[in-house]
Image (tube, helix red, strand yellow):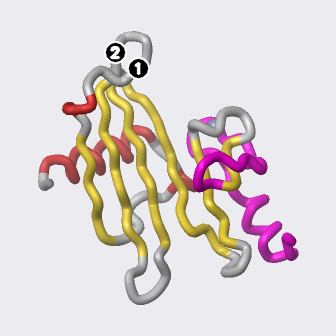
Amino acid sequence: MLNQADKTILNSLKCPLCKCPIDINPVKNYNYGCALDPTHYRVMFDYTLSKIKYQTFSFCVGDNKYIITINDFGQPIGFKTEIFFKKLDGNGFEIDSNKEKRIILEGNLFDFTNFIEEKFLNRIHTILAFN
Ligand SMILES: [Zn+2]
């Protein structure tokens, strides 16, 4: 059951990519997603803790797809950010799973409320360069 605080949090969430609100979308381990296209943005909201447990954001640039998941494990672990990097063919399909790269880092490294493609890409490229 949603209380007012939960509603406020959920109503404030928007898809980073298309800025649509999120809607109930129970798929796999998520319960909310972008109302336009849940593949953009998915959220697992934990009603018992009144917070987002994890959220995943996907975007494509050229032949690359970037999938960023931020997990909030709570204390003492805190946040972890996972980045998937995939190569796509001309139709947007993944070319070769061997070309995938997956990195897990400490902390909450991306602000999904303020998505600026160039900024995200710069950060991802910096992270890839050092991992
Ligand atoms: Zn969207």
The boundaries of the magenta stretch are: 1-30
Tell me the amino acid under the disc marked 2: Asp
Instruction: Give the residue at x 38% y 39%.
Output: 66
Left or right, residue 52 beside residue 106:
right
Numbered marks: total: 2
Tell me the amino acid under the disc marked 1: Phe
Where 61 sits versus 89, above or below?
below
Say which mark, if any, is on residue 79: none
Where 63 sits versus 26, above or below?
above
Residue 103's x, y, as percent?
26, 54
Instruction: Give the residue at x 44% y 55%.
Output: 69
Instruction: Give the residue at x 42% y 58%.
Output: 110
Instruction: Give the residue at x 48% y 40%.
Output: 58
Q: Assign the N terminus to one quadrant of the image.
A: bottom right
Is residue 22 a member of the stretch shown in magenta? Answer: yes
Q: Secondary structure at mark 1?
A: loop
Where 119 sits versus 63, above or below?
below
Residue pointed to by mark 1: 93
Q: Secondary structure at mark 2?
A: loop
Residue 5's x, y, as percent?
80, 76
Say which mark, if any, is on residue 89: 2
Left or right, residue 82 beside residue 72:
left
Decide: marks 2, 1 in contact (CB < 8 A)?
Answer: yes
Q: Nearer the viewer, residue 112 or 65?
A: 65
Q: Ligand 1 is found in which quarter of the picture?
A: top right
> Residue farthest to the front?
28
